[in-house]
Image: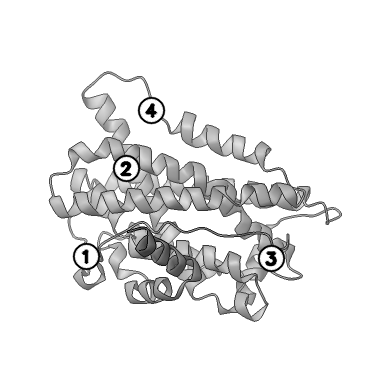
Amino acid sequence: MSNKQAGPVESERIALKARNVSFSWADTPLHWVPGDPFTTHTINVLHLLLPAGERWFVHVYKQALPLIRDDRLREDVIGFIGQEAMHSQAHDEVLPHLREQGIDPTPYTAQVDWFFEKLLGDRTLPPGRARRWWLLERIALIAAIEHYTAFLGDWVLNAAELDRRGADPTMLDLLRWHGAEEVEHRSVAFDLFVHVDGDYRRRVRTWALAFSALLFLWQRGARFFMENDPTLVDGKASFAEFYRSGRRGTLPATGALLKSIPRYLSRAYHPSQEASTAQAVAYLAASPAALAAEQHEKEAS
């Protein structure tokens, strides 16, 4: 059974390019949301979870390139690969800063590496149906995960409460640059899935796995940070605190997260119906890191 009802909003498509950004963390405090270690560390999970995940995206998509029969989609996938590789690098570069602040992320990142490299990595399968099945499963998983990265990207672009609370501007720029690019390329993973397969049962099955895995890894990561923060005594992470933070606007609202589930599972779903490319492009045109990367590129050419 194939899901062919979804249709893109053509005006939301944009040519994708990787921006070679860099950030300095010298002036970023451990609790970069002042007085709010829980929000800080819940978002900090991104720095531990995304590098391995996005390297895995790139690895899988390079295997998928021979299956693409549409030139425009191939161009989008290549742009997606470039952006995701840059995201992985940018978040990876936060890890030395965390170590300097007294938090060694290795125990958690080792688990994340195992999840993507071993559990979801390449398998010794015979050529043909079995090998194609495993590739299609992972393409569908990425489509489901990208639904949530776009959701988070849209959220952080609009998270005015973080500004009101004096969140570190460099960290906000990293998050919003990344979030804007997630919104920019939000349709690519789903379009690739529909192009190579599109089976609705696979979409539902892999969504359930992706959602459960993200929830599990995120709560483990938040707990890891709170328990290992050297400035906290008996630091704890809880779903109740996540809910309260969502009500305050410093984290995504639980209700909004839950409402995103039936949208993805709708047969009429297409990612271009979510978020705003115009808003993402507008942020990237003003992002200090993106502007610096553009200037550096001009000087080098």
Helix, strand or loop at mark 2: helix
List the residue tagged with mark 3: 32
Amino acid under disc 4: Asp
Mark positioned earlier in the residue sequence (3 or 4)? 3
List the residue tagged with mark 4: 122
Residue at 19% over, 39% down:
67
Q: Is residue 108 visible?
A: yes
Q: What is the distance, in whole Å, between disc 1 and disc 4 at their CAs?
A: 31 Å
Give the label, 1 or 4, closer to the camera: 4
User: Can you tell which mark lies on residue 139?
Assistant: 2
Labels 3 and 4 touching (C-beta < 8 A): no
Rate crowding at label 2 as few (under 14), some (14 to 19) or many (20 or more) other CA atoms within 10 Å.
Answer: many
Mark positioned earlier in the residue sequence (1 or 4)? 1
List the residue tagged with mark 1: 8
Q: What is the distance, in whole Å, between disc 3 and disc 2 at their CAs?
A: 35 Å
User: Can you tell which mark lies on residue 201?
Assistant: none
